[in-house]
Amino acid sequence: MLPAHAEQVLEIYRLGIEGGDATFETAAPTWEAFDGTRAPEHRPVAVDEGGRVLGWAAVTPLSDRCVYAGVVEHSVYVHPDARGRGIGLALLTELLTSTEAAGIWTVQSGIFPENTASLALHARAGFRVVGTRERLGRHRGVWRDVVLVERRSPAIG
């Protein structure tokens, strides 16, 4: 993911936010805020032949405590016009390849239970459901549950 992708990446994020089942966020951040909080070495993008960004994935460290150095939280977003074409799985596969090569042993995320497409995608990518955090936060005036998923690297033990 390069600064040249910024506008399209943030637009895809905005569309996901507007859909209501992707995140607790209510607005896309600035590029500077986005760029400053996501690990630059683990940010694959899917781009079509014309250079249009179709989707992206990124990770943030779970904690700055050294014991959690191998644990990250991730996001994956695909443009609504590009869904159903395997882009999400390709992005997650690339993300898992890069994180595993860097010694990261756990990649996790929280997913709204209503986001069944994301839950299915993560299951296909080898994630398991750890549990459901009930009424974790209010979103648009409604309490929302979050399903915690994780993938543990089989190569790092």
Image: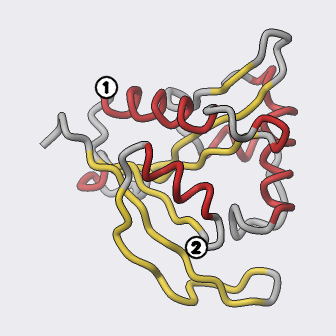
Could you say where residue 82 lies in the image, as x and y percent from the top left?
A: 78, 35
The one nearer the camera, 122 or 101, is: 122
Q: Which residue is farthest front? A: 84
Residue 3 lies, in percent from the top left, at 76, 24
Q: Earlier in the sequence, mark 1 or mark 2?
A: 1
User: At label 2, which amino acid type do we have?
Assistant: Pro
On screen, residue 64 above or below 101: below
Q: Nearer the viewer, mark 1 or mark 2?
A: 2
Neighbour tally class for label 2: few under 14, some 14-19, many 20 plus, Cα within 10 Å: some
Q: Is residue 35 above or below residue 128?
A: above
Point 53% across, 48% down: residue: 121
Tag 2 secondary structure: loop
Kind of residue sitting beneath label 1: Ala
Mark 1 to mark 2: distance in Å? 30 Å
Instruction: Name the residue at 80% across, 89% down.
Output: 141
Q: Which quarter of the figure is the C terminus placed in?
A: top left
Q: Is residue 128 above or below residue 89?
A: below
> Given the current orientation, which residue lies at the most extreme top position?
49
| Figure quadrant of residue 62 | bottom left
Determine which residue is flagged by label 1. Answer: 101
Displayed quadrant of residue 129: bottom left
Q: Which residue is mark 2?
A: 113
Q: Which mark is residue 81?
A: none
Front position in the image: 26 or 32? 26
Q: Nearer the viewer, residue 91 or 14?
A: 91
In the image, is 143 to the left or to the right of 30?
left
Q: Badge 1: few (under 14), some or many (20 or more) residues near its Cα, within 10 Å?
A: few
Looking at the rendered image, the quarter that the N terminus falls into is top right
Element marked by disc 1: helix
Residue at 54 percent of width and 75 percent of height? 146
Q: Is residue 42 left or right of residue 19?
A: left
Residue sitting at 50 percent across and 37 percent down?
A: 92
